[in-house]
Amino acid sequence: MKNGKPSGAPTWKSVTYAFLIYTSVALAFTLLGVLLGPQGAQVGGTRPDETIPGHLAELALFGVILGLGSAVLYGRKGLPLVVLTPALTVVLDIDHLPAYLGYSQTIRPAHSVVFLAVALAATAITIKALDIDFVVVAAFMGHLAVDTGLFAPFSPISFQYYELTPYRPAFALGAVMCALAAGVVLRRRYRAEGTGGGS
Ligand SMILES: [Zn+2]
């Protein structure tokens, strides 16, 4: 942003890149789980078919709420973030793909802080927009705040599983804080550029 290329509103192009990067890293972690996970850890499955739409709807809803928290002040200019947040929140579950296709896999290989670190680094280096960085973290935490069951927080370094439920309130809080932080970044940028925040 400093090198003569200030980006004002988040663009559809940048949020599309963010989505593609996040999805690609999630798929890479899914593959790493299949390749590196010990046999005893390859017990990941899918939830019963009939509960999938409801769960995805819950994820999307929380994502929309987070996205609105970031960008509702900016009207149409904030819309890309309002769309990006639920899209990232939902797409993390692409790491269930092998089980869905009938292959054995580790449990939730991309529901991992290692995944978050890699996805965030890839997004930050490529897109260089702090608001989108915060949205990436908000969407990840928002997803874990809605999920229940087991996860491997350090996959693919360790496939030790932990119960997610005790951490859900912390993830929910982190998600909200990061969504709001994305909004603060937007607000500062608009002010610096004298474009106003809209109202
Ligand atoms: Zn999930």
Image (spheres, grey):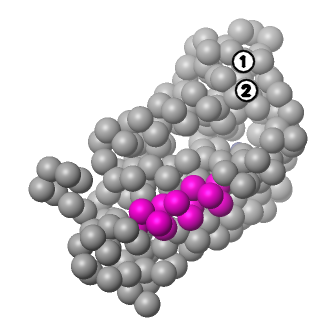
194 relative to 199 in the view: left or right: left
Query: From the Cβ of disc 2, is ligand 1 less than 8 Å away?
Result: no
Callout 2 environment at 10 Å: few (<14), some (14 to 19), or many (20+)? many
Query: Label 1 near label 2: C-beta < 8 Å?
Result: yes
Spot occupied by residue 36 in the image (x, y as percentages of width and height): 61, 12
Residue at the image position 24 percent from the left and 73 percent from the top:
193
C-alpha gap between disc 2 and disc 1: 5 Å
Q: Is residue 92 visible?
A: yes
Which residue type carries mark 2?
A: Ala
Spot occupied by residue 187 in the image (x, y as percentages of width and height): 40, 72
In terms of image quadrants, where is residue 90? bottom right
Query: 87 and 192: which one is in front?
Result: 192
Spot occupied by residue 38 in the image (x, y as percentages of width and height): 71, 9
9 relative to 31 in the view: left or right: left
Residue highlighted by disc 2? 152
Spot occupied by residue 112 in the image (x, y as percentages of width and height): 64, 32
Residue furthest left in the image: 4
Residue highlighted by disc 1? 159
> Magenta stretch: residue 142 in it?
no
Residue at the image position 76 percent from the left and 32 percent from the top:
151
> Magenta stretch: residue 184 in it?
yes
148 relative to 172 in the view: left or right: right
Q: What span is in magenta? A: 175-186
